[in-house]
Image: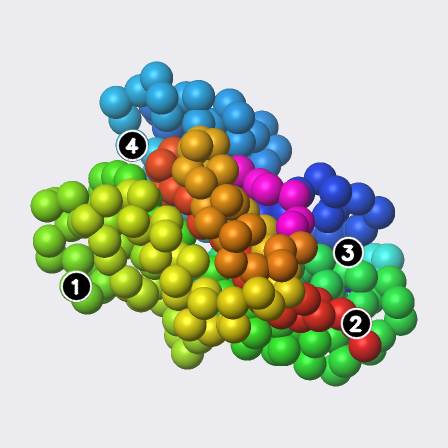
Amino acid sequence: MQIVTDRGADLSAQQLQGLNIHFAPLRITLDNRTYTSGVDLQQDAFYEMLANTESYPTTSTPSAGDFVDLYRSLAKTDPEILSIHISSGLSGTLNTAKMAAQMVPEAKVTFFDSKTLSCPLGWQVEAAARAAQAGMNIEQVVALLERIRQKTEGLFTLNSLKYLIHGGRISHLKGLVGSLLNIKPIIGPEKDKGMYETKAQEITFNRAIQRIVSLIESWYPRGSSLRLQLLHGSNEKGIELLRQYLSAAFDCRWLPTVRVAPVLGAHTGPSLVGLAVGPLDVADLS
């Protein structure tokens, strides 16, 4: 079994080590130049570019041809492919992959809608790759992914909404009419369609970070042992503040902190601070 995903998945170098994961390209255009996220544009360079331009980046999903080439190449080695992608409620990537698979009859492709993105998607992809290495069959791996999808939450807040507004990513979010009045929303994908929804909102960035912890306390008793991974654009101060609040409230088992992939950061900007959270055993293969 071969694992395919896209650059909407955020995984640290440590998580990727020893795993055979194939990424469909997601492209980003900034200042009239187009890059492939995670290939010729890495996180550090991307956020440095954002800091030095007045332009807004734009993104595009992989083409059907990109998926055809990838599936066809992989099928030569092993035709069984599990393709796990950024939420279909946020991107057309999954639908494009499904169309492409119809053009590669030699590949047996199973699709899984993560209904999330960034680190929560990365958790699904990493678990699938480890399960495949362990010899689990496709039905077992899909059941594992369904459990992770249900039990993992992703949350983020931003000090500036200008990238979300420019990219049209908050047009459907109720309660953000007052965003231009400096409201700081706490946003996460909902479980049904995987679309963004406003979980809460505060009037300062510090209070928004504290509210993230309060939301987690509403899901898990204070002091619970939790699996956590912090993520940010270019906001080390915000990340350390969130880490302090979480460490005071929970028994935290930390995965390496990651910077959000350029193709995601194009819609959120450098101020983003967020996390993936779930029970300690959420990704166990048993």
Q: Which residue is mark 4?
A: 56
The magenta region covers 254-261
Check contact, mark 1 vs mark 2: CB within 8 A. Answer: no
- First in residue order: circle 2 vs circle 4: 4
- Does the magenta-highlighted stretch encompass residue 141? no
Check contact, mark 2 vs mark 4: CB within 8 A. Answer: no
At a point 47% along the width and 73% down the height, the residue shown is: 219
Q: Which residue is mark 2?
A: 285
- First in residue order: circle 1 vs circle 4: 4
Query: Residue 227 at what x, y percent from top left?
Result: 63, 60
From the viewer's perspective, is the residue at label 1 or at label 3 nearer? 1
Callout 1: 10 Å neighbours few (<14), some, many (20+)? few
At a point 37% along the width and 49% down the height, the residue shown is: 209
From the viewer's perspective, is the residue at label 2 or at label 4 nearer? 2
Amino acid tagged 2: Leu
Disc 2 on helix, strand or loop? Answer: loop
Q: Nearer the viewer, residue 65 or 109?
A: 109
Amino acid tagged 3: Leu
Residue 120: image quadrant is: bottom right
Q: Which residue is mark 3?
A: 74
- Residue 154 visible in this rendered orientation of the protein: yes
Residue 182: image quadrant is: top left
Q: Label 1 to label 2, Cα distance in Å?
A: 39 Å
Query: Residue 191 at what x, y percent from top left?
Result: 44, 75
- First in residue order: circle 1 vs circle 2: 1
Q: Label 1 to label 4, Cα distance in Å?
A: 25 Å
At a point 26% along the width and 39% down the height, the residue shown is: 160
Disc 4 on helix, strand or loop? Answer: loop
From the viewer's perspective, is the residue at label 3 or at label 4 nearer? 4
